[in-house]
Amino acid sequence: MSSGGRLRIVSIAHPATSSEAARLRYRHLASRPDVDLHLVMPEVWKEFGRTIKAAPFDDGFPVHPLPIRLPEAGPMKWYLHFYPALRRLLRELDPDVIHLWEEPWSVVALQAQMLRGRAALVLEVDQNILKRLPPPFEAIRKFVLGRTDNILSRSPDATDVVRARGYKGPVTPIGYGVDLATFKPADELTIRDADAPLRLGYVGRLVVEKGLDDALEALARSRSAVSLSIMGEGPHAADLRRRVLELGLGDRVDIQGWASPAAVASFLRRLDALLLLTRTTSAVREQFGRVIIEAQACGIPVIGSTCGAIPDVVGDGGWIVPEQDPERLGRLFDELGAGRSELMMRAQAARANVLKRFTYDAVASAVETACQAADQARRASRAVGIQPLQAN
């Protein structure tokens, strides 16, 4: 334990470099009276063609931006990086728990496992498709999972993946958090006419797997006055614009590029419902769908597909339709366009879903719970002279 008897946690997380929103969870965690938090992140991170430097935020707790090697290389891209200075930092800090917001096959997870010393190891996992990884990553995953003390899992599918690859220890569910200061309902409730056109929207990458072609087909089939606004960029953008013209939807569909979080929130508040119609493929299964909780935090319900974690995240705050079923989707558009009572009821449930499950305080609670349990289990094992290994 650190001075004052607090649990010293070193969290290693490359997402904290690329997004201020990813840092908010740590501010809540650091505010806990029993936690002494240190955050490690890449000094420079490369993602989706962008080079991002760790910005100096006023976090109120120690942040350690460190140089990394192999920031993007080969087919595994982000999973090869490691920190040359990590050994020295861990010796200096002597943590009780190392928490990794990294997948178990990553080189940095292996590095943390090798350098952990007396610390317990907690991993936060998203991967929800079981597939055999190329060498040496399958061996790294087995080695790391066999020596992990607690798993923070984003979804039941992610839990199934680590179980199938040998993890036998405790699992703590964890969601993502949403910035409630940015993503919030409109200041004034606007009552729209019952016969006003239904306003639908999408925010995210423009790729085939997100099912926007199904949305356009459903729009063309719908007998109601329905419009669709799309915010995002990606390789499927040109095909979507062409399909809009082919279906004669030019006056009902608009497409715009990325915007700031505040602008995204403003965009969402103008909708009646958000769409997230991801299609399952051999390589894609929705791991969470962060835009779901951003919309719901604004009081906007979500129409989601059955793909991956979408139904669980949406909860009562929306509707779930089968994947790649424009006919059923079009009927839902007509049902919602016929009256506002269902929309209003789901909008209230959407906001309640976020406040109950997806605040940054809830995320911080999950991390603290997993780290406390891992530390206690490791101390108990040391007390009886047992090294807690789960691997055969």
Image (cartoon, grey):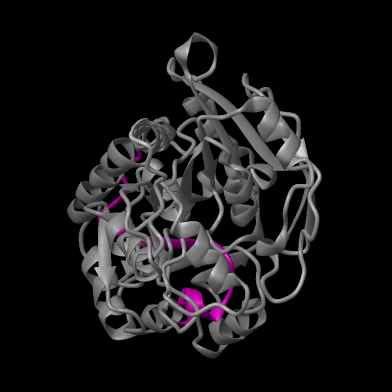
Q: Quadrant of residue 164?
A: bottom left
Please, is residue 132 above or below residue 364 in the view? Answer: below
Residue 14: give x, y in percent of width and height: 65, 48
The quadrant of the picture occupied by the C terminus is bottom left
Is 152 included in the stretch rendered in magenta?
no
Please, is residue 337 above or below residue 138 in the view? Answer: above
Residue 169: give x, y in percent of width and height: 32, 52
Residue at the far top in the pictured view: 4
Residue 124: give x, y in percent of width and height: 47, 50
Magenta span of residues: 190-213
Residue at the far bottom in the pictured view: 246
Quick one: 253 or 78, which is closer to the camera? 78
Q: Please give left or right for residue 237 compared with residue 345 in the image.
A: right
Please, is residue 326 above or below residue 98 in the view? Answer: below
Q: Quadrant of residue 322?
A: bottom left
Residue displayed at 25% across by 42% down:
348
